[in-house]
Amino acid sequence: MKQGSTKLAPSESNVKGKHGGAYAWIIVVCLMLANTMSFVDRQIFALLIEQIKADFRISDTAVSLLHGFAFAIFYVVFGFFFGRLSDSMSRVKIIAFGIFFWSLMTALCGMAKGYISLFLARLGVGVGEATLSPAAHSLLAASFPREALGKATSLYSVGVYLGAGFAYLVGGAAIQYVASLGEISIPLLGVVKPWQVAFMVVAFPGIFVAGLFLLLKEPVREIQAGSHRRISISEKGGFVSLLKERRRFYFAHMVGFAMFLILGQGYLAWLPTFFMRTFSWEAGDVGLVMGLVILIAGTAGALSTGLCVDYMYKKGYVSGAMWISAVIAGATTLFAVAAPLVNNEVTAVVLMIPTIFLLSAPWGVAVAAIQGVTPEHYRGRLAALYVFSVNITGMAVGPTMLALFTDYIFGSEGDLRYSLALAAAIFAPLSAACLFAGVKPYRNLVLVDSPLC
């Protein structure tokens, strides 16, 4: 059979709620906004590393545990809980609760007086943000047919880079401004540091975004809408049977993207510090330059891949999501290794542009691929498993792995650049190999055994 020659059943795009119409795109925009807020709250930490280290007198490894591990451990564990809820309860209300809670916890990060209190507040941010991915992935797959899902999930993933970019821009400006004022005293809190004010500033808008989700209507689920699609053996056997039956694709997909996220999270966590240590930049300079690079290159990368994969899908190349992701991972190796090793700051910034573009490119289609071959009543749980497998390594390991390289392999804070290059040389090729291994099983699922066909 020629690849892509099997056409989807006509009923696929006619399921109630799967029209991809105006209201579905409103949901996408709101989810993108929520994703933006989550990454502002999450990524602001990267710009504050040097100040937090100085105040608490801790090592790169200790501060990396605050950035990655403290956030990721509860983020992935509670993801299963919220994933199960997302399969049966209102997803928009789950997200509204999560946004309010993680914003509150981010504000508490700004009130922390020591390492332990900041660690606990970061745990709380992880709990709140655990609501978003399972519910959002399920909402997207329920609102769009497969031929439009790549664009929708890519637009949602743009929030990552909007959030990271705004975190750098707003955080850098806030730090610079507060530092110019000298000591600031806040009632009940006393004297606060610039890094504490930055946390409080980025937490405030989350209250309004949470309220926005309370105004949204929950899309009608396929099962509730009376869909008569074929029920596969794996669905009858339950979630575990589904995982066993499709283990080749799920394993290759999740491990491949986990390897890629280790590099991506490590880069985003340590880029500001790299420029500060290597080229003696101030926080405001890093925030402005890298904020713009991430906003422009990250957004372009996230959007372009989704458009490309949807076009390929319509032309019959149904395995495009996995194939393009594998190529991107391989291409990332060259730029991500070279960028931190150059001795000129302008050249480093120029090389960071394609690096950020590539690091951002596959994430929307990653969600589209895995949700597109998963039955709706398992999507929340599958999204939670995806979040767990990818993020427990990417978020928890990525920032700490680079810190361990710096502290224990190279032995000097000034050698952070070599840690970035080493991580790229290891994890980008591993990611590419795993994703290439997932191309064939993914194609088979779409053509032969897709639950949506």
Image (cartoon, grey):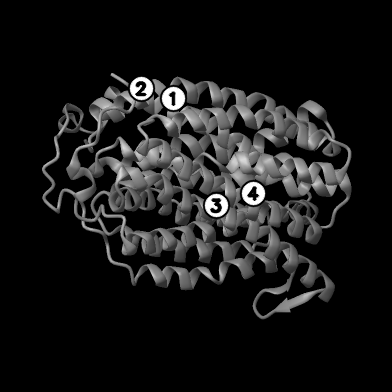
Contact between labelled residues 3 and 1, with CB atoms less than 8 Å apart? no
Q: Secondary structure at mark 2?
A: helix
Contact between labelled residues 1 and 2, with CB atoms less than 8 Å apart? yes
Q: Select label 2 or label 1 by which is in front.
A: 2
Identify residue for label 1. Answer: 252
The label on residue 422 is none
Q: Secondary structure at mark 1?
A: helix
Identify residue for label 2. Answer: 441
Contact between labelled residues 3 and 4, with CB atoms less than 8 Å apart? no
Residue 111: tell me if it is visible.
no
Dot 1: few (<14), some (14–19), or many (≥20) neighbours within 10 Å?
A: many
Residue 210's place in the image compared with 325, above or below, is: below
Residue 362's place in the image compared with 280, above or below, is: above
Q: Select label 4 or label 3 by which is in front.
A: 4
Q: Earlier in the sequence, mark 2 or mark 4?
A: 4
**450 vs 267, nearest the viewer:** 450
- The Cα–Cα distance between marks 4 and 3, rounded to whole angstroms, is 12 Å
Quadrant showing the C terminus: top left
Task: Give, as a three-letter code, the residue at label 1.
Answer: Ala
Identify residue for label 4. Answer: 297
Q: Earlier in the sequence, mark 4 or mark 3?
A: 3
Relative image position of residue 284 (x, y in whole percent): 79, 61
Task: Give, as a three-letter code, the residue at label 2.
Answer: Pro
- The Cα–Cα distance between marks 2 and 1, rounded to whole angstroms, is 9 Å
**Which residue does the image show at 76% across and 51% down from the upper left?**
53
Relative image position of residue 63 (x, y in whole percent): 70, 46
Identify residue for label 3. Answer: 160
Horizontal side, residue 223 vs residue 297: left or right: left
